[in-house]
Image (cartoon, rainbow, N blue to C red):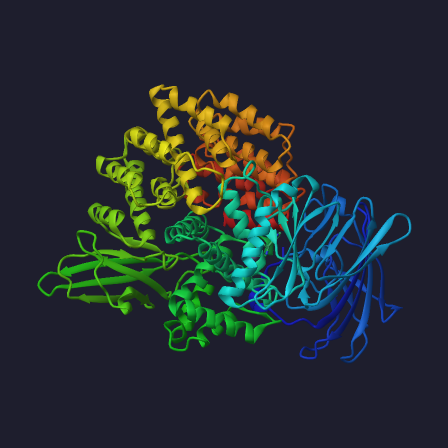
Amino acid sequence: TTVVRREDYAPPAYWIDTVELTFDLDPAKTRVLNRMTLRRNAAVAAQPLRLDGEELNLARVLVNGAGCSFKMDAGQLVLDNLPEGNEPFTLEIFTTCAPEKNSQLMGLYVSQGTFFTQCEAEGFRRITYFLDRPDVMASYTVTLRADKARYPVLLSNGNLEEEGPLPDGRHFAKWVDPHRKPSYLFALVAGNLVAREQRIVSRSGKEHLLQVFVRRGDMDKTEHAMQSLIASVAWDEARFGLPLDLERFMIVATSDFNMGAMENKGLNIFNTKYVLANSATATDTDFANIESVVGHEYFHNWTGNRVTCRDWFQLSLKEGLTVFRDQEFSMDLCAEPSARAVKRIEDVRVLRTAQFPEDAGPMAHPVRPDSYVEINNFYTVTVYEKGAEVVRMMQTLVGREGFARGMKLYFERHDGQAVTCDDFAQAIADANPDSALARQLEVFKRWYSQAGTPRVRAEGRYDAEARRYTLTLSQHCAPTPGQAVKQPFLIPVALGLLDAQGRELPLPESQRLVVLADASATVVFDDIDSEPVPSLLRGFSAPVVLEYADSDAQLLTLLAHDSDPFNRWEAGQRLALRRALAAVRADGPVAQPLDAAFIDAMRAVLRHDTLDAAFKELTLTLPSETYISEQLEVVDPQRVHAVREAMREQLAQALHADWAWAYEQHRDNGAYRPDPLSAGRRALAGMALTMLCLDARQSGDAVWPGKAYQRFKDAGNMTDRFNALSALVVSGHALAREALPRFHAMFRDEALVLDKWFALQAGAPDRGGNILPAVRQLMAHPDFQLRNPNRARSVIFSYCNANPGAFHRADAAGYVFWSDRVLEIDRFNPQVAARLARALDRWKKLAEPYRSAAREAIARVAAQAELSNDVREVVTRALS
Ligand code: HT7
Ligand code: ZN
């Protein structure tokens, strides 16, 4: 295995100016003619041209129209007798590939009879020989030829310049992309598809055609994606002054896709999961995800496509920034300020339950990694979500307007270039020379170079005589693989002070944002009349763990009164976490972990007359098992599961009347609309129903399960229907056995709904070890398809990654199942296998017997001789 290192970056020896691709599309054998003009890069010493290629059959190579000598070396096509000097020359390469055999879904592949491509990160080399690296940007002209009856729609990037018939029932289409681009943004689609179309006029008065292509039967599920696209175009123009730079912008949906979606220039390709939705088949979460993924891919058109990455170590340049942009987009679409806060809480929850563990585990890496074996393994929550937090901190430090100024400068400087994370940070700082960011840019950039989650300790001291409150902040970051010692980070800490009655104390602006740039700092607040309650890290102003020994009384004050909704939610989480950890650490059987004060506080939130429903649902949701486990040195997953379940059951029982009230108050929302407010009401009603069914399980009551079943049958939308089904399954009620087959029968032709059906069962709470056998049965179901990533994820990932109480079995059967599946999937799709392989990242924290059994399972995978680089990198790191 070869390790690629950031420090080894060297500019390419050649530039490719133009690429003319001609495809004769055939699932078994597609012929590709690649005609390029190249020239030497005068800035580097003369050297052979080495073109990347993978699983290609090479037929012919011509230089300036004549045959030439070449050799193959480590999969690369090497040409060393090229014309001297810096004049452009042409290179023609004829190859074939077999799209129908492409099970990796990288390069050119066939899904349900339609051709698709996926080129990021290194898929273009599976289509033709090329300098397959993002700093080589070229102008593309693409001609597609295919059977007209089977493939009536032929798409590629840019503008359709010509189309017409060919002999033998074939036809062609010629596409010209007006923008230079790196190879990873190339795309083609050919198949029998239909499109929802919309013409829009942008702010500058230009007309554009927007299209969403799907299979014929899915047309009634494209309205929301189209509306999301229209909103995205408008938002990027309004917030950042970034217009759509294409006459035509296309989205195409495929059900076979390794990730969520792909931002190919003008021709985005999407997993169906992030396109298709109507009220009968998609939940509120699906609608929200579609809006943010459509936005995300669209925003890449500037942050990623117009300005791209110099090399793959800079991935967060486009991904962190674009996640930040899609988060801001979703927040700006919220009509109510409270809905913005809900979105922020949801984003932070993802960061803390997925990225913090990554930062503390064997795959920990900086936002800008230093090395990789397989770049596909670095499309991570660190690069994406932590990368977005780094961008958010920049905005916090320079202000919203300052950040927009910085973005403007970034595009003025770098439009059309392939650049680095340093270039981005420099532009934001240069546009804001008086900011803390500009003053301490080198310290700030440690967020890009140092892995690990800093811990910020806060200590407050009140001097009643001097009417002075002193806050001391200090930071520490534990070592991560390859980085033993960390330098201090630059940490913006947004804060406020409350009095004992929960009233906000007025503070000057300079004290509402403290910038910690050294190991520790002290802030003094004068004229404070009584001991205040500090509200620290408001809005989660930095991706750190806050250590503050707040009392229950302080947390209850924050929960009841904090003007910062994020910290209000956080206070509830800290109260719950404290109780969970105490119960996990206690000896003996799990008793009732919750006390009256906590239950009363939760009741007050649930019954509150001004808080909105979505916020209540988030506050009443206990910290996840994963999050609880992360706080422990040694984890007994069964104990953590039992404690959390006991807490849930206690809340279900103690708040029974309140849940019944909440259900009745929130169950009816009128006609379905997926806006945040009504989605919040449905979420709270769904939670209430689950709690009532859980309580019925303990009390033997049949009324609420009966109501849930009725709701399941009568619901007017998928959110309510699925929540009712889930309440029955999660509570393990006998009616679930009737509802599940009924649900399957109703939606047998809706692949995305069946994914939910599979996932619900594989993710259900374990009762006496019943889930693993259920998972095996689900895999034997006629609708199960291991090769379809969505379906594989719905069963296998839902079990191994999202159901710790069922996966971590004392008999190790869950781990054996995991290793079997990693090996099985690796044989045809290494990328998906490597994601699954991450399920045991945190094995070193496990208590015995789980720890030894997990290590053995990982070692079993690692011992396999025929392993992909993807999986080998993950398991090697896990064992190191
Ligand atoms: N930029 C896209 C990344 C992506 C991808 C990477 C590797 C293999 C398959 C892939 N599909 C999409 C997605 C995004 O962040 O927008
Ligand atoms: Zn992205």
Q: Give x and y (percent) for residue 638.
A: 39, 33
Q: Does residue 727 appear in the picture of this structure?
A: yes
Q: Is residue 44 above or below residue 566?
A: below
Please, which residue is most extreme toward the right here?
Answer: 167
Q: Give x and y (percent) for residue 211.
A: 66, 53
For the N terminus, which image quadrant?
bottom right
Q: Give x and y (percent) for residue 440.
A: 39, 73
Please, which residue is most extreme toward the left here?
Answer: 465
Position of residue 353 in the picture relative to residue 460 (left or right): right
Report the front residue among 113 and 484.
113
Position of residue 599 in the picture relative to residue 74 (left or right): left
Report the front residue among 702 and 830.
702
Q: Does residue 589 appear in the picture of this structure?
A: no
Q: Quadrant of ligand 2?
A: bottom right
Q: Is residue 522 above or below residue 812?
A: below
Q: Give x and y (percent) for residue 212.
A: 65, 50
Q: Count of labels shown?
A: 0
Q: Quadrant of residue 679?
A: top left
Q: For the point 15% across and 60% down, which residue is it? A: 462
Q: Is residue 94 above or below residue 352?
A: below
Position of residue 582 in the picture relative to residue 217 (left or right): left
Report the front residue among 743 and 82.
743
